[in-house]
Amino acid sequence: MIHEATELLETLYQPGLADGRLPERKGISVTLSERERQVLGWVAEGLSNQEIAGRLFITERTVRFHITSIFNKLGADNRTQAVAIANRLGML
């Protein structure tokens, strides 16, 4: 399973997509919003939902919403996996 995931990531990897777009695969393109990219960056730095909410002047619930959206778009199950996938795709 890990081998298959690694192969999938390698086929998806296209450096230089700093605009938040994930590489296209089979005609599907996924885009992270500016706010999602901002939240993901702070998740990668290790900030808690509460810390992110404080920086953005939003509620923790809204931060959780953004993180859930990021997980769904990246196909991640947790924060560590989301950061690893985003890093592998050249998004961080």
Image (cartoon, rainbow, N blue to C red):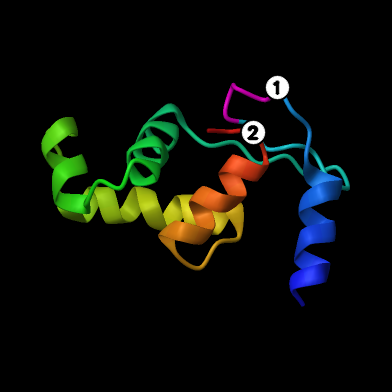
Sooner in the amino-acid sequence: mark 2 or mark 1: 1
Q: As drawn, is 20 to the left or to the right of 35? A: right
Residue at x 45%, y 52% (from the top left corner):
69
- Binning the other alpha carbons within 10 Å of mark 1 as few (below 14), some (14 to 19) or many (20 upward) gives few
The quadrant in which residue 4 appears is bottom right
Residue at x 78%, y 40% (from the top left corner):
13
Residue at x 77%, y 77% (from the top left corner):
1
Q: Is residue 76 above or below residue 20?
A: below
- Binning the other alpha carbons within 10 Å of mark 2 as few (below 14), some (14 to 19) or many (20 upward) gives some
* Helix, strand or loop for disc 1: loop
Looking at the picture, how far across and down is residue 26, in whole percent? 88, 48
Q: Is residue 18 magenta?
A: yes
* Helix, strand or loop for disc 2: loop
Specify the label residue 90 is tagged with.
2
Q: Is residue 30 above or below residue 14?
A: below
The quadrant in which residue 15 appears is top right
Looking at the picture, how far across and down is residue 50, in whole percent? 14, 50
Residue at x 76%, y 52% (from the top left corner):
9
Looking at the picture, how far across and down is residue 86, in whole percent? 58, 43
Q: As drawn, is 38 to the left or to the right of 21? A: left
Q: As drawn, is 6 to the left or to the right of 81? A: right
Q: Which residue is mark 1?
A: 16
Specify the label residue 41 is tagged with.
none
User: Which is the main secondary structure of the residues drawn in magenta?
Assistant: loop
What amino acid is at disc 1? Gly
Q: Which residues are magenta?
A: 16-20
What amino acid is at disc 2? Gly
